[in-house]
Image (tube, rainbow, N blue to C red):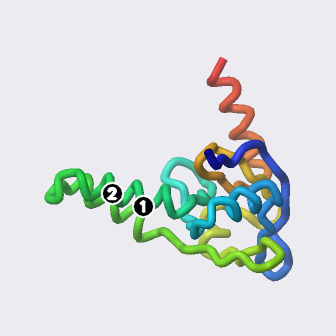
């Protein structure tokens, strides 16, 4: 099973590029899947998912009540925000200004592995999130 594990620090460079940690790049490469980015619906961070996860989400949408407004809102909230990420040969992608504003990312970032996806946080917010998660887990 392909999984994104652990946490890694990084930066947003002067050209608004983020370099994906080598461990996560290897996972993406092994998966041979497209990569998608969207603004989290739970936190002030960005989520990165493989196409298999997006495909399973779309399938679950299609299996639900077609006429349900709640289902339609869910589809709109997620699918209208997805952006396919193009990763260059050095493992970088460009972060759009709208994503920078949403996530409050200016320079220092942290990548947080979540198994089937990973999150990209402003470093200070991500570190706080990790600490709070540990406290709530106890």
| Relative image position of residue 119 (x, y in whole percent) | 65, 53
In the image, taking residue 20 as reference, residue 102 lies left or right, namely left
Q: Are marks 1 and 2 in contact (CB under 8 Å)?
A: yes
- Packing grade of label 1 (10 A; few <14, some 14-19, many >=20) is few
Q: Distance between the residues labelled 1 and 2?
A: 6 Å
In the image, taking residue 26 as reference, residue 115 lies left or right, namely left
Residue 65 in the image: above or below residue 77: above
Q: In which quarter of the image is residue 78?
A: bottom left
* Image quarter (top left, top right, bottom left or bottom right) of the N terminus: top right
| Relative image position of residue 26 (x, y in whole percent) | 76, 59
For the residue pair 2 and 62, the one nearer the viewer reads as 2
Label 1 sits on a secondary structure element that is: helix
For the residue pair 73 and 65, the one nearer the viewer reads as 65
Residue 105 in the image: above or below residue 17: above
* Image quarter (top left, top right, bottom left or bottom right) of the C terminus: top right
For the residue pair 63 and 74, the one nearer the viewer reads as 63
Q: Name the residue under label 1.
A: 55
**Residue drawn at the location 80% of the way across and 68% of the way down:** 19
Q: In which quarter of the image is residue 95?
A: bottom right
- Packing grade of label 2 (10 A; few <14, some 14-19, many >=20) is few
**Residue drawn at the location 84% of the way across and 60% of the way down:** 10
In the image, taking residue 36 as reference, residue 128 lies left or right, namely right
Label 2 sits on a secondary structure element that is: helix
| Relative image position of residue 37 (x, y in whole percent) | 58, 66
Which residue of the protein is positioned furthest toward the bottom in this rendering? 15
**Residue drawn at the location 61% of the way across and 60% of the way down:** 48
Q: Name the residue under label 2.
A: 59
């Amino acid at each position: 099973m392909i999984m994104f594990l652990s946490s890694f620090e990084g930066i947003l460079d002067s050209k608004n590029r983020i370099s994906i940690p080598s461990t996560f790049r290897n996972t993406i490469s092994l998966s041979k899947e497209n990569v998608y980015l969207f603004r989290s619906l739970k936190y002030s961070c960005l989520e990165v998912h493989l196409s298999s996860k997006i495909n399973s989400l779309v399938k679950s949408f299609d299996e639900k009540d077609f006429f349900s407004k709640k289902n339609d809102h869910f589809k709109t909230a997620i699918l209208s925000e997805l952006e396919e990420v193009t990763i260059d040969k050095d493992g970088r992608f460009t972060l759009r200004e709208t994503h920078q504003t949403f996530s409050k990312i200016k320079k220092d970032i942290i990548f947080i592995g979540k198994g089937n996806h990973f999150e990209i946080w402003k470093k200070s917010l991500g570190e706080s999130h990790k600490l709070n998660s540990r406290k709530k887990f106890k």
